[in-house]
Image (cartoon, rainbow, N blue to C red):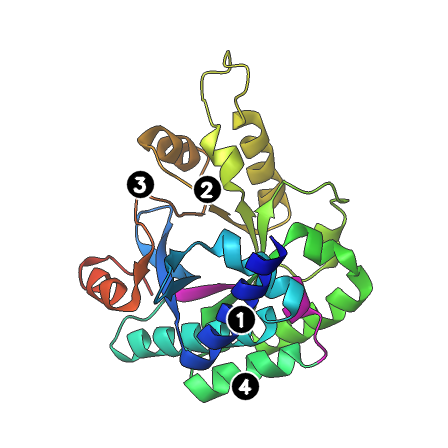
Amino acid sequence: NAQERLEMEGLLRRALDQGEFRLHFQPQFRLDGSLSGCEALVRWEQPRMGMIPPGKFIPIAEETGLILPLGNCVLREACRCMAGWIQQGYTGLTMAVNVSSMQFEQDDFVLRVEEALATENLGPHQLELELTESLVMENPRENARRLEALRELGVRIAVDDFGTGYSSLSYLQRLPLDTLKIDQSFVRDIYPDTSHSISSAPIVETIIGLARNLHLSLMAEGVETEAQREFLSNLKCDGMQGYLMGRPMDAAAFGLFLQSATILK
């Protein structure tokens, strides 16, 4: 295992130098079915090993610190792609980008975000940074400072995998947040029939009610069935993403997808 990790680290460094990482984009939709934007997902197609799943290389990238250059590359490329689509006339879209804890905790993180937006000519309101619930709560005072700086830029902030942590909900009132993303584990276990012993429907209803009271937007992840979509629609969930409506696709495919998608400004 140690030898495999060492080899993977070397391959990761080479992949960064040679530009082997690519972004795929999963579409996100509003309640009315119109396209609201997409989430950028990093993919690695290694010449010898083929497609390597993120779950295999992201942990090693985080352990070795390579997540910093990788995260910066993802941020810049995501901004570049969205700016290009907007220049083609597809306005009213938001690009969601996941941020690792190591990235977010860098002293120059806000500056790097500002530079990426300026370099790629993307408006800050068209970028949404996704932070996990546990990351937001790690160092609330320092994180609040960074979040406020991002808010001043005009960047949106989403709490990813919401509901999977065990932190105090008071941070939802104290921190400058815009969106809660309902974790796909809850969406997967939605069974409107309350007699089902493992239904997460009550949890999802509670999260949606909480967000409403705090004036936060909602995005449900992992929507894969019509029953899930209908349940979320009946509860007026603001947005959804999942295989039912659109799988992750590369930039060229997403560009073609935009040609047939309904987009609201």
- Rendered image: mark on residue 244: 3
**Along the line of sight, which residue is nearer the eye, 70 or 238?**
70
Sequence-first disc among 3 and 4: 4
- Rendered image: mark on residue 221: none
Sequence-first disc among 2 and 1: 1
Q: Which residue is mark 2?
A: 237
Q: Quadrant of residue 2?
A: bottom right
The crowd level at tag 1 (other Cα within 10 Å; few <14, some 14-19, many 20+) is few
Q: Are marks 2 and 4 in contact (CB under 8 Å)?
A: no
- Indicate the position of residue 158 as horizontal and vertical percent values: 57, 57
Q: Quadrant of residue 95?
A: bottom left
Q: Is residue 169 left or right of residue 55?
A: right
SS at badge 1? helix
Quote the CA–CA distance across marks 1 and 3.
37 Å
Q: Amino acid at mark 2?
A: Cys
Stretch of the chain drawn in magenta: 94-107
Q: Quadrant of residue 121?
A: bottom left
Please tell me whether mark 2 or mark 1 is closer to you in this view. Answer: 1
Q: Which residue is mark 1?
A: 10
Sequence-first disc among 1 and 3: 1
The crowd level at tag 2 (other Cα within 10 Å; few <14, some 14-19, many 20+) is many
Looking at this view, name the residue that lies furthest to the bottom: 119
Whether residue 99 can be seen here: no
What residue is shown at x 31% (from left), y 41% (from top)? 244
Q: Amino acid at mark 4?
A: Glu
Q: Amino acid at mark 1?
A: Gly
Sequence-first disc among 2 and 4: 4
Quote the CA–CA distance across marks 2 and 4.
33 Å
- Rendered image: mark on residue 115: 4
The crowd level at tag 3 (other Cα within 10 Å; few <14, some 14-19, many 20+) is some
